[in-house]
Amino acid sequence: MPMRNIHTHYVKLIFTLMLAVVVGACGESSPPLSSDELKLSQRIKEANSGDANAQYNLGSMYYSGKDVPKDYSKAFQWFEKAAAQGDAFAQGKLGVMYAKGEGVPKNAAKAVEWFQKAAAQGNADAQFNLGFTYYYGVDVPEDAAKASEWLQKAAAQGSARAQAQLGFMYEEGKGVPKDAVKAVEWYQKAAAGGDD
């Protein structure tokens, strides 16, 4: 083979290899993940490994639609996994989802069951929701005494909603003795900026 043909042959070979590398680098690989995609990927990995906090956080993302499409069914699945491990926040969210029928059929008995589990662990939101449910008889028998008990616990933790509800209860004298002074005290606490 003449020298010129060998040289041409090698140039074509090198050009072909370079072209293959460029095409492969540009068209065949996946684009790099964004920082949000990396965070989501990491959170999913942690949640799948059984981390209750990651499961709750992932459920919250799907519930609110933050960084992922809103999906109550997926939110419920992740909350359920975290709740099974005793996560009070997830238990409270399951109560809300059952109460509202979000991602699951509406079921007051299951809502109360999950609120009770979370409230027993000191979750102020669940304590408020349980108190509210009993006070207004939302799909359960009305029970102002139980309502007062749970609202007192939530209010002691700074729940402005519970403080305002207690103010109303003292103003009306339902579930507690009628007491305008205490009503004003609770209203003032709520107005001063509880935690919610």
Image: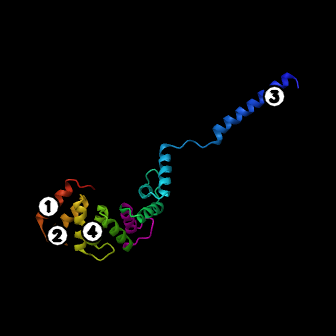
Marks 2 and 1, how far apart at CA:
12 Å
Comes first in the chain, label 2 or label 3 = 3
Circles 2 and 1: CB atoms closer than 8 Å: no
Q: Which residue is mark 1?
A: 184
Q: Residues within 10 Å of mark 2 (few under 14, many from 20)?
A: some
- Label 1: which secondary element: helix
Would residue 96 be counted in the magenta stretch? yes
Circles 3 and 1: CB atoms closer than 8 Å: no
The location of residue 24, given as percent across then percent down, is 67, 39
Marks 2 and 4, how far apart at CA:
16 Å
Frontmost of labels 2 and 4 is 4
Establish if 143 lies above or below 194.
below
Frontmost of labels 2 and 3 is 3
Q: Which residue is mark 2?
A: 172
Q: How many marks on residues?
A: 4
Q: Which residue is mark 4?
A: 131
The location of residue 195, given as percent across then percent down, is 26, 55
Left-right relation of 15 to 50: right
* Residue at left offset 28%, top offset 72%: 134
Comes first in the chain, label 2 or label 1 = 2
Circles 2 and 4: CB atoms closer than 8 Å: no
Marks 2 and 3, how far apart at CA:
97 Å
- Label 2: which secondary element: helix
- Label 4: which secondary element: helix
Disc ID at residue 140: none
Three-letter amino acid code at the position of disc 3: His
Tell me the quarter of the picture where residue 89 sits: bottom left
Q: What range is drawn magenta here?
A: 89-108
Q: Which residue is mark 3?
A: 9
Frontmost of labels 1 and 4 is 4
Circles 3 and 4: CB atoms closer than 8 Å: no
